[in-house]
Each structure stands twice: as structure tokens, then as C-alpha cells.
Amino acid sequence: MQKPFAFYLSAFCLLLASCTLNPSLQGKGEDYLQGEWKQDSIPMQKQLLSYSLFKFKFSCDSVFIEQSSVSKVNSGMDSCMNAGHWTEYIRGTYHQSHDTLHIKGNFCNADYTLKKQAGCFRYGPYEEFFKVSKKAGSLVQFLSTSNVIPVNLHLIKKTSCNPKPL
């Protein structure tokens, strides 16, 4: 009778040793990214049929993205397309490894609450990888793995990370 007990006890101990508690505070993120960043324009944007401009807000390891899109081609319902101008919102977390920024989150409403399946444009998970080229203290360039147009951002408001409880 002692053999099964010893077996279960050792299995339970191994299970406990392999488990870790989640941190009670959010992560610090990257110091140089903390704050609000904005893309004002892209090269040759007047000649493009469609393009997007971004605003990023980095707060510790969290990111809030506002993607404003313009399209001269009507490819959807006009109530959604708003005469070719619309904005999508994303909230998530990020981490950087070497020169690669990985953002993982969800599409949201304008107040960053989770977006339901009904409605206009994309909903559900968002995941993107960017190659980061740091140009200067207040300029940064993100090169998306899914788009050829670089995202050139300038810092509009610097903040510092104050981790919040999860």
C-alpha cells in the first residue's frame, strides 16, 4: 500500500515544482518605448489606393494601438467605410527580443473594451511582428512582417512604467 502512496506523492511534488505562480504585477516592458507614438504620414501616400496610419501607446508591457485607414476603393458597406476613412483599435501586450517586437492582443472598441463579433471590420485576436529600427530618442521605425510600408513613429508624449496589479 505504501508504493502507490509514494508514487502519487512524488508525482504531486514534481507537479508543484514545475508550476509557477503568475506575477502579481504587469511586466516593465521596454523603457525606450514607454509613451505615446504617432505616425503622421507615409511615403507617397497620395498615390496609394489604401493605407493606414498608426498611433501606439506603450504602458509598461501593455500596448494600445489606433489604426486609422484610408481607402479610395469602396470594398465594404458605406456605413462601415465612412466614405473611405475608418479606425480600428487594438489592445494587448508586447515583448521585444533583439530587434523583433511581438504584439499579441485583440481588436477592441474605441474605449478599448473587447469588440464583439458583430459589427464592422476585424474582431478577435491580433498578432503582429515588427522589426524595430531605432532612429533616435524620439523617432522609431517598425517594419511589419505582413506589410512593406514602414511605420515611422515620432514620440508625442514620454511616460514611465508604473506596474499595476493584475
Image (tube, grey):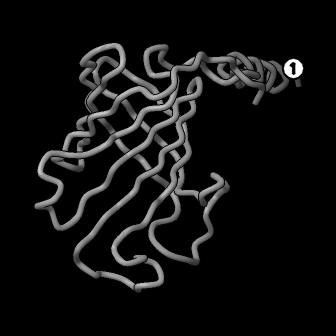
Q: Residues within 10 Å of mark 1 (few under 14, many from 20)?
A: few
- Residue 97 position within the rendered picture, expressed as x and y whole percent measured from the top left: 36, 20
**Can you say whether 74 is above or below 84 in the image?**
below
Label count reads: 1
Q: Is 32 on the left-hand or right-hand side of 166?
A: left
Quadrant of the drawing holding the C terminus: top right
| Nearest the eye: 146 or 140 | 140
Q: Quadrant of residue 19?
A: top right
Residue drawn at 60 percent across, 57 percent down: 110
**Can you say whether 6 is above or below 101 in the image?**
above
* Tag 1: amino acid: Gln
Residue most extreme to the right? 1
Q: Which residue is mark 1?
A: 2
- Residue 102 position within the rendered picture, expressed as x and y whole percent measured from the top left: 39, 34
Q: Is 44 on the left-hand or right-hand side of 19?
A: left
Q: Is 67 on the left-hand or right-hand side of 131?
A: right
| Nearest the eye: 28 or 21 | 28
- Residue 23 position within the rendered picture, expressed as x and y whole percent measured from the top left: 71, 21
Residue 15 visible in the snapshot? no
Q: Quadrant of residue 28?
A: top right
| Nearest the eye: 9 or 63 | 63
Residue 107 visible in the snapshot? yes
| Nearest the eye: 50 or 114 | 50
Residue drawn at 44 percent across, 38 percent down: 103
Residue drawn at 30 percent across, 35 percent down: 130
- Residue 46 position within the rendered picture, expressed as x and y whole percent measured from the top left: 16, 59
Quadrant of the drawing holding the N terminus: top right
SS at mark 1 in the image:
helix
